[in-house]
Structure formats: structure tokens, C-alpha cells
Amino acid sequence: MRGEGRILLALLAVAAVLPLVIHDDYFLHLLVVAGFYVILASSLNLIVGYVGELSLGHAAYLGLGAYAAALVTTRLGLSPALSLLAGAAAGGIGGLVIGALTLRLKGPYFVIVTLSFAEVLRLVASNWVELTNGPMGISGLKPPDLALGRGLVLAVHSQAAFFYLVLVLATLALFVMYRFVHSNMGRAAIAIRENRHVAQSVGIDPFFYALAAFVLGALFAGLAGAFYAHYFTYVGPEVFGFSFMMSMLIMVLVGGKGTLIGPVLGAVLVTLADEYLREAQQLRLTLFGLLVIAVVLFFPEGLVGLPAKLRRAAAMRGEARQ
Amino acid sequence: MLDLALQFTVNGLVVGAFYALSALGLTLILGLMEVVNFAHGEFYMMGGIIAYYLTGVLGLDFFASLAIVVLVMGAFGWVVDRLLIRPLRSKDTLSTALVTIGLSIFLVNTFLLLAGTAPHKVATPFPTAPLLLGPVVINETRLFAVAVAAVAILGTHLLIHRTRLGGAMRATFQNKEAAALVGIDVERIYGFTFALGTTMAAVSGALLGSIYVAQPTVGGLVSLKAFVVVILGGMGSFAGAVIGGLILGVAESLWGGFVSSGYQDVIGFAFVILLLLVRPYGLFHIRSERV
Amino acid sequence: MSAALLELDGVSRHFGGLAAVREVSFAARSGEILSLIGPNGAGKTTTFNLITGFLRPSSGRVRFRGADITGLKPHRVASLGVVRTFQKTNVFGGLSVFDNIVTGQYLKARLPYWRTWFPGRVASARDADMRRNTERLLDFLDLKRRRDDPAMSLPYGDLRRLEIAIALAAGPELLLLDEPAAGLNTAEAKDLVRLLRVVNRDWGLSILLVEHNMGVVMEASHRIVVLNFGEKIAEGTPDAIRSDERVIAAYLGRRQGEP
């Protein structure tokens, strides 16, 4: 197994024992939210980091997943476990449709059209009152108890239980992404990012692999959305909004795009920072804005790239001394 | 019914004039410099807030304030280009888009800290009394603001097509290497273009702030609308931005008046999505697809 | 050495009203090194683009091993065994030299998509194969020292060899090289000729070469096709081309018919 896989496993092991040592419900809540963002940011990273396309419509899949979960449980009365699947499916199908329509477009057009799709969905969610309850949103979702067999139900009620649920989902997501990224498919996606023309000339179909990464990313964003719906027991049009998009984008950038660990670190750090700077509401966002600028200009590889950058700098100093 | 339609059309043209002005700024930045500028709406917002401070708080004359907005925001645009965009000139769309997203977050929240969430109105010397033009009602401030917008659009057109500087701009964006070879300072042209785009957004914001209100959080929607207009009109197309802006203004006004005000903002996005599906080359034959 | 591997049959390409390539026909035979030469703007790179699907011909047909490949997408053309390099050096800049060559083997590494998530023995065997092949190419192109360096940090000569390594990694039957000697010094150009010969003779690859360096062209080619202003003006062995008057006139900058 590669270094990246080992680090992820170590992080998983640490995460798994956290509820045993932390009994503070508020802190566990933060960790659940961080877990949600780990899935979300990692899913965006497949597109932004690996294929190298700035999709600003990623909140669309989050929203589709959240609404799908809310609708199948409140309207159809399906079990919450099925609604997680429904959320992932809704996100994936949304990604397939939107990706197929937009991935042929050049850079700036792609950015704006993906954003347009998310905005259209947000406006539909606020205006189609019969289906979505409009700006009021859908509330009263049940916790996602998992029926393991007749009479055997894994109840997900406590913060710790939610934490383990999100940990399982995040692990699943990262495992699927790990295999993808380190396979021939993943190499093809990276090749498109690095040089589209050379990729084509060695036989890679850029559209197909960009779409594959796109659908995979959308699917896990949908899953994250479904989890969000059950955890907060409420879904409103803001799930399609640009603020989710901003949050996940900041996480991917700060952690380091194009690596699996980067978005995980970014999600946890930004979630915690966001919470502890909450009192300084606008000042916090002002700082985030500066942070994004600084990362893009000076640390394009994010936190994950920092050790290598420091090493390079040290090596340069060493050479200069000799 | 017809009178109502006429009224909605006039309202739409008024709003459309400002869409056009702010989209013109963006078509320079997005169409020519290929920077997907998410801070465009914030430049617009800054124009409005600064104009409010100058007229409402300091009590300056409206025209003097407008001139100050032009100078301050021009300088601001130049600095932004120098510090944030120039280091990324050789990079891809992703980097510049991201840096402007950061700038946008920074500016919105800085202005929320400074100016608060309350909407402000830019003071003008014109009476707000309604003016009756046949069946159509319009007030003097609106008429005046539209006139200033028209002058700004015309002025920019002349600047680009009749001056040496404009000639250097056109040469640079047609072929950067060749322009550099004949002695044009390409970096200076980029800086100027960005400053010009910024100024146009700010003037649009100051003018619209005199009709509606100036507010720190307005930028996001303005950016999106400007993107929509630029895509409709064709990247970098001057006439396209003007026509696209007017069409969007009228379409929104008619749709909002007759069909559904809830879906009014969907129109622009729906236009863009449909356009790129039906005519992926854009309205003005600019290729949006890749090989 | 006789069967036609690649055939162009009256291929034209217009840009607006201008013909970049006009009614060009020629055939590359299996096992040969065929060079495409001509002054700047003669349409050589356009011809490459027309063969490999980066451009669609306005008219005419392109056939590979008898099958019509006109207008196929670039990756489809590549998957049939026609792999190209680019005039401006093109590699996967952010990846290491090793990963560049691994990525080049995409076609050989393809497995059913579900294997991505359930790799099993097949995938690991395939992986090991690919690594061996990569080491072999690193060795062959003298890039071993650079194995783990990011491609964008390579000096120019190494970069050009990496580009060829990526193309070879794709396992082509016909290799199209667009000015591989551009910017190389005399010694490096000699090495390139040696390399082309080995690849051609020992590995059995056919090569279509666009090149300005006449030393390389004359030494490496079995046959030469000459383009001028988008039209074919001559075809033959290096010796025949060297003494062809139309070719000499074209290179001295005169159009046909002018004194």
C-alpha cells in the first residue's frame, strides 16, 4: 500500500477511538460535521483536484442528495438506510446529466454553466412549493436507523452513533476514491489535467474519464447530502447555495487539491476553525478570504504540499551556502 | 395590458442598461483577459457603497462623487491586477478564478464590517417625482442614471476604438507576442484593462445605488448576472454585452411581471444553459467547445 | 516492406478560404521510416493533425491498415496504434518521469472498469508488467537518473526523449514524430537518428517523421514526401529528393513556375 493509504488508515484508527475518549456532545457534534465535510470536500476534489476542472455547481449534488433523502423518507416512508442510497443515486444521476452537458465546454464556460445549474436547482427548490415546501424546507426527518435483520436494529440516535455512521460513510467514500485514483482510470483522469493533448494521443478519452470522475464526485456529494438531511432532520433550499460551495472549495484548497489526504485535513481544520471563530462572524470570513488568496498565490499545493515546499527551501539554502 | 407590457419593457430597459454597463466591465476582464472574475460583483458593490459615503455621509456633490469613484476604483483595479492576477497570468483558469473567489469573500465581509448590513441609498440632485411619458411612468433619477450609463458605454467604446491606448489594447488581445514585439508594454495594458473593467462595474453600482440601494451583500447576484450577459453576448464582444444586457433586463422584467416573480432570476441561467446546448459556439460564433 | 500501413487519399483541409493542405495523397509502408518535409507553413503539422484526429479533413480519406479512420477522435486513432508527439514539447508536466511513462501505457493497462475497485491478481500482475516496461524504457532512453524528477524540471534534451518515451509506452504500430530534433545539438541529433533506427529495425515500428534538420532526415529516412504550400510536390528516396529541382526551388523560396 502506498504512503497515502497508510496515512488515511492511521487517521481512521485515531478517529475510531475518539468517541471513547471524548464525551462532550458538543465536540462530538463538531466531529460529525467535520466528517460530513470530509465526504463533501473529497468528492469535490475528484473534479477540481484530479481532473483539474473548476466545477462551481457541486452544491447541486449535495442538494439533490439531501432533497432525495428527505422526500423518500417523508413522502414515501422508505427506511432511512435506503434514503442514503437514494441520496447517492440522486447525486450521481445529477452528475451524469450535468457533467454530460457541460464537460465539453471550455474553461470559463464550464465554470459558469455548472454554477448556473446549481442556481437553477436552488431557485426550483425555493419555488416548487408542492414538492419541496419552498423556502420553509422539509423538516422532521428520522434518524437513519439501520435494520440489520428481523428485530435487529442499529439505532443511530446519540452523537457517538452519528459519528460512527459518518465515519463509516467517509471511509467507504475514501476507499472508493483511493482505488479510483490509484487505478488506470485515475491515471487517465490525472493525465487529462496534466496535458489533454498528450492524454488523447496515448489513447485516453478525455470526455469519458472526466465524466467518470464527475459522476463519482457527484455520487458522494449526494451521499453527504443525504447524511446531512438525517443529521439535521431538515432540508431547505440553502443546500444548493453558494456558501456550501465556498466552504468545500476552501477546504480542498487549504488541505491540498489533487491528494486524498488534503481535503480530509482541510475539512477537519476549517470546520473547527469555523466554529471557534464563530463569535467574530464577519472577521472570520474576511480571514477566510485572505486565506484563499494566500493559498492560491503562495501555497498552491496546500497544507499537504507544505513539508515538500519547506524541504525544497531548505535544500536551496543548503546549496546557496555551499 | 399593452400599457403594462410597455411599462415592464421600459423598466427592463432601465435595469438592462446597468446589466450592460457592468457586463461591459466583465467582458473586458473575462473575454479579453480570460479571468473568470468572481469579485466583479464586489467591485460593483464598492462603487455603490463609496458613492453612498461621499454623497450621504460627506455630503459631496453627486458628480464629484462619481468622479472620485472612478479614480479610486480604477486605482483599486490596477492594484488588484498587479498583486493578485499578474502572478497567475501564465496559469490556468482555475487559479485566477480561485483567487478572485478569495477576493470576493474578503471584500464582502470587510464591507459588512465597515458598512453593516443595512441598505444605503446614494443621494442624487434629481427629483424622484414620476415623469409621465404617454402611458409609461419613469422618474427623473432613472432617466438620468440611464443617460450616464449610456455616456459611460459610449466613452469606453471611443476609448477602445479611437485612442492609441485602445489600439494597443486591441493589438495585445489579438496577439500578445506580436504586440510585445512592436513595443507595446503588454503588462501595462493588462493592468489598464483590469482597472477599466473594475471602474465600469463600480460606476454601474454607484448609479444603480441611486435608483435602488447599495448593500455589501449584493455582489454575488451581480457577478452571476454579468457572467450570464457576457456569455449571451459572446466573450469579449462589446456590442454583445450591451445587447445581451438589455435583452436580459427586458426578459426578466416581462417574465417577472406576467408569469412568475419567483422564477425571475432563473431566466438568465436558463438562457445560458439553453444557448450552450443549442449553439455551443455562442451567439457570436466564439468557440466554447474544445477538441 | 511493401504493404501500405497508412494511406492518405486526396486529403484537404481549409481554414476559412485558405487551404492549409490541398489534395495530399501518400502512403507510409509497413516497416519504413517516412519523412514529411517542406518549408515553414507547408502543412506538415496540419497533416499530422489530420491523420491523428486532432483536425477533421475537409475532404479526402485517411486509411490505416486498410480501415477508414477519417475523422475519428484522437484517442480512437491512438487506440488503433497510431501515436504522435507534438511540435511544442508536450509531456505530463506535474508528474514524475516514471509516472509519465506509466501513464503512457494507458491502453495496455486497461481492464474492465469494475476491476478499478476489485483489482485482484490480474491487476497486480498488469501493474508489475507495466513497471518492468517503464524501467526498460527509462533505460532505453537514458532517463534513469531522472526517474523521480517532475517532468517540468527536466532539461530540454531529456524532455524531448521523455516525450518519445511516452509515445513508445503507448505501444504504437506507427509512430508520428513532429520535429523531434528541434533544438537538439549535433551530438544529440545523432543519438536521435540511432534511436529511430533501433526502434524501427529492432522493435519493428513504422515511423512518420516531420523534421527540419536535413541531416537527421537524410540519414534516417527510407523515403521522403515533400510538401509546399499545402501540396505534395515530390516523393522519393533521400537521394532522389536531394537532387529534385522542385524541392530545391521550394526551399529557396520560389513558387513553382516562377523564374
Image: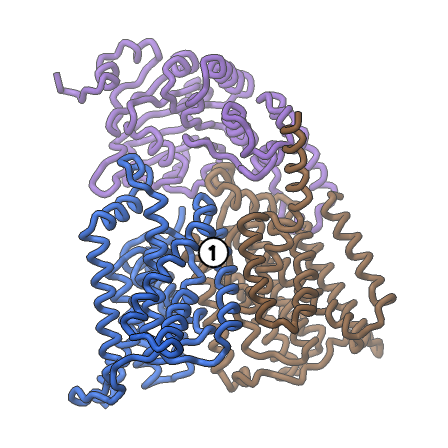
Chain C: drawing colour: purple
Q: Is residue C126 above or below residue B253?
A: above
Q: Is residue A147 visible?
A: no
Q: Position of residue C190 (x, y in %)?
A: 48, 13
Horizontally, residue B274 falls left or right of residue C134, namely left
Horizontally, residue A240 falls left or right of residue B264, namely right
Q: Residues within 10 Å of mark 1 (few under 14, many from 20)?
A: many
Classify residue A313 by image quadrant: top right
**Which chain has been coloured brown in this picture?**
A
Q: Residue at x 51, y 68 (%)?
A: B110
Q: Residue at x 51, y 23 (%)?
A: C157
- Quadrant of the drawing holding the C terminus of chain A: top right
Q: Is residue C161 above or below residue A213?
A: above
Q: Nearer the viewer, residue A294 or C4?
A: A294
Q: Position of residue A249 (x, y in %)?
A: 57, 60
Q: Nearer the viewer, residue B105 or C77?
A: B105
**Residue sticking out furthest to the right:** A20
Chain B: drawing colour: blue
Horizontally, residue A247 falls left or right of residue A264, namely left
Q: Amino acid at mark 1?
A: Ala
Horizontally, residue A184 falls left or right of residue A25, namely left
Q: Is residue B148 visible?
A: yes
Q: Which residue is mark 1?
A: B97
Q: Position of residue A222 (x, y in %)?
A: 61, 67
Q: Residue at x 19, y 20 (%)?
A: C254
Q: Position of residue A54 (x, y in %)?
A: 50, 56
Q: Nearer the viewer, residue A185 or A14?
A: A14
